[in-house]
Every structure is written in C-alpha cells, then in structure tokens.
Amino acid sequence: MNSGSFSGSIDLSLLGWNDALPLPAGTVPARVARVDRGAAEVIAAEGQFQARYSARIRRAAAEDPVSLPCVGDWVALAALPEGRYELDAVLPRSSAFVRGGVSRDSRGGLSGDGQGQVLAANVDVVFVAEPSMHSTDFADLGRIERLVALAWESGGVPVVLITKADLFELGLDELLADVRAAAPGVDVHALCAQTGEGVDVVRAYLHGAKTAVILGPSGAGKSTLVNALAGEDVMETQQVRAADGRGRHTTVHRELIPLSGGGLIIDTPGIRRVGLYAMNDGVDLVFSDIEELAEGCRFGDCSHGGEPGCAVQAAVEAGELPERRLESWFKLQREAAWMARRSDARLRSEETRKWKILHKAWRQPGRNRP
Ligand SMILES: Nc1nc2c(ncn2[C@@H]2O[C@H](COP(=O)(O)OP(=O)(O)OP(=O)(O)O)[C@@H](O)[C@H]2O)c(=O)[nH]1
Ligand SMILES: [Mg+2]
Ligand SMILES: [Zn+2]
C-alpha cells in the first residue's frame, strides 16, 4: 500500500532535512520512501514520485551493495529532460541499519555472502517491537537483546515496545522488569495499538521531525502501530492471526511514512533472522551488566566459562544474573567472533588476489619497472 502522495511544495525540514548535508551543485534533494528494483520512490519538495538510478549509482552499487539507496536515505536528484529526475547520489548517512547477509540454513549451518545490506538509513530511533504474547509463546528476550544490540550498532537509539499488552494482563509488570534487565539503559514501554493505549508515549519519540524504524517479528503488530500513529490505515495489517504465530508476512516492503502529527516512521517486514554484521560495541552495550560484573573476575581475560574467581559465574549462582542471559551473551559473542574471522579471511584473500595481479604484471616482459 502506498503512504499517500503529496502535492504542492513540501517543507523538507519536516522530513528531517539537515542543511549541513552536502548537496552537489545543480541537484535537488529528496528522501527515499521506498526502494524498488532499479528505482526508488522519493519525496522531494515538489511531491512524491519514482526516480530511476543513474549509471553512476548502478556502478557504485555493483562495487559495494552498501552504497545502494535504501529507505530513509537522503539523495541527490539530477534533472533529466521533460521535467523528470534520476537518482544520482546518496548523501552521507547519519546512521545505517545494516543486516549481515548471513543466515542459518535448515541444517543449522551458517551461510550467506557476508555482504552487509542496509535496511534503513538516517534513523534516530529504533523501535524494537516484541509481542507480550505471540501465539502461545511469551516475549522472546533473546530476540530483544539481539535487535537492541543491532540498534545500538546502527547509530540510532533503541526503544523496546512490548506490543499486544492486552494479551498479557497477569504479571505484565514482571515481564517489563525482565525486559528492562535484558536491555539495560533502554526505555521499555508496553502498549496496545488496537485500543491506542500507550501510543502517545511512542509518538513523543518522533517530536522534532525525528525518524524511527520499527523492527520485530511478523505479527508483532508493527503495521497496526504505524496506522495508530498515522491516525489512518496507511499500511495493510494481518487480517487473520496465524495459528502457529509465524504465519506469512503481511508487510513485504520497507516503507517510510511521514506522519501528519510530525515525524516519520519506517515500517518493515517481520524479521525472521537477524545476522550480525561487524557487531562489537552493540553487544557490549546490551550486555553492560555482564561487562561490569566481569571487572570483578580474577583473570583479566576470564571467559566466564568456569575459571576460578569468576564474578560472572558467581552472580549466576547467587541468582543475580539469569543464566539465560549469560547463555545469550555467549551465543552473540561466538557469532560476532565468527563474523570477524570471516571478514578477516575475506580481506586476506582480497589482498592475496591483489598481490597476484601485481606479481603477474611485474613479471610481464617489456614492462617498465620502477
Ligand atoms: N490483541 C491485540 N492484537 C493486536 C494488537 N496489535 C495488532 N494486533 C493484531 O496482530 C495481528 C498482526 O498485526 P500486524 O500489524 O499486521 O503485524 P506486523 O508486525 O505488521 O506483521 P508483518 O507485517 O507480517 O511483519 C493483526 O491481526 C492485528 O490485528 C494489539 O495491541 N492487541
Ligand atoms: Mg506489517
Ligand atoms: Zn569471569
């Protein structure tokens, strides 16, 4: 579904435009609302329309997919004849939400090209939506930790939203306490988008033409919340609740929606698996409690895996740190280490390739040698 079109002159500052962005001479600024193959739906001062990619953009993207325009990007449009425009440059991003091209296949092995894909750019706030109840499951704390880590990594500020609060009346306070412990230093709110309860609290994060992205599993109620924020049905929502809780994805495109009350929100399809992409600081931030405890370990390089004098293990035994959380930390550490090793290996093989080419050129007869 489309987020509606504009007519007349749009004040770009309402879309979050920042005068400090370096706009090439002779081009017009626009914000990417949605990406299609080879083209993007953009919002410029004169309205919303589709702009095709210039040859320059296509060349850059072939070298590095991260340079492809993505939803939320500010771009430069170059004028074509007949009043049309082409998308000619992506302006520097203030934040980028990147997902690794890594996923776990059916046999549990990791696969993928390891190339990052930018999911959203220039995002101020990352809403991590997790349903209080998902079919017969309770909120998944591990998924929250993972998405919050990725949010910190993106440069945006994470905010956890426990959706469908109406389905979890008994002990909602305890659930919120568990979520807060899983995401230290992060705002956590419960809401019910169906009745509108808690929606104003969410809206307040968008004051000042801020841009948010909403992430979470399919069926979490992301689009329902976006509609509640917009005050009208701009996004399609799941009509029948899937019996197994996984269901099909109702939202299939990432889309930037300007809200009439101010601010913008990017709705996204449900995330099945989140790969880590060069994740370092994000993991440390989401597990700041473990990092803090670790300062009390006897050994500076303690792995908290059974060494003597381990303050982290002691906290687990004392019931101060949930064992689940330590397991989750181990898991994300392993993945981050794996990703780092992989990109090292890729760098090395790239270097080897360059040297081989150089070496070959060197040995070619008749070449000028320095
Ligand atoms: N009980 C209850 N149901 C809700 C609430 N919010 C949304 N739902 C229902 O949950 C289902 C899924 O909502 P959507 O908004 O389509 O979920 P989504 O996260 O956008 O899902 P995808 O687009 O597939 O990623 C719909 O049937 C909604 O009516 C809520 O606050 N309470
Ligand atoms: Mg949706
Ligand atoms: Zn330790």
Image (cartoon, rainbow, N blue to C red):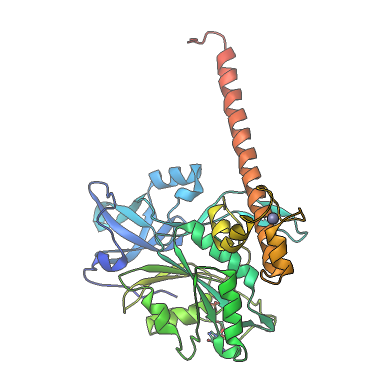
Left or right: where does residue 86 sit relative to residue 317?
left
Residue 288, quarter of picture: bottom right
Q: Can you give x and y, in whole percent of width and height, for residue 2 in the image?
A: 41, 74
Q: Can you give x and y, in whole percent of width and height, for residue 356 in the image?
A: 61, 24
Left or right: where does residue 166 sit relative to residue 120?
right
Q: Residue at x 60, y 53 (%)?
A: 101
Q: Residue at x 63, y 34 (%)?
A: 349
In the rendered image of this protein, does residue 131 appear above or below residue 45? below
Left or right: where does residue 65 sit relative to residue 322?
left
Q: Nearer the viewer, residue 57 or 167?
A: 167
Left or right: where does residue 202 sit relative to residue 246?
left
- Residue furthest out toward the top: 366
Q: Residue at x 50, y 84 (%)?
A: 191
Residue 85, quarter of picture: bottom left
Q: Residue at x 29, y 61 (%)?
A: 17
In the rendered image of this protein, does residue 246 appear above or below residue 23? below
The answer to whether residue 209 is visible is: yes
Q: Nearer the viewer, residue 5 or 333?
A: 333
Q: Can you give x and y, in whole percent of width and height, for residue 116 in the image?
A: 55, 51
Q: Quadrant of the N terminus?
A: bottom left
The answer to whether residue 97 is visible is: no
In this rendering, the count of numbered labels is 0
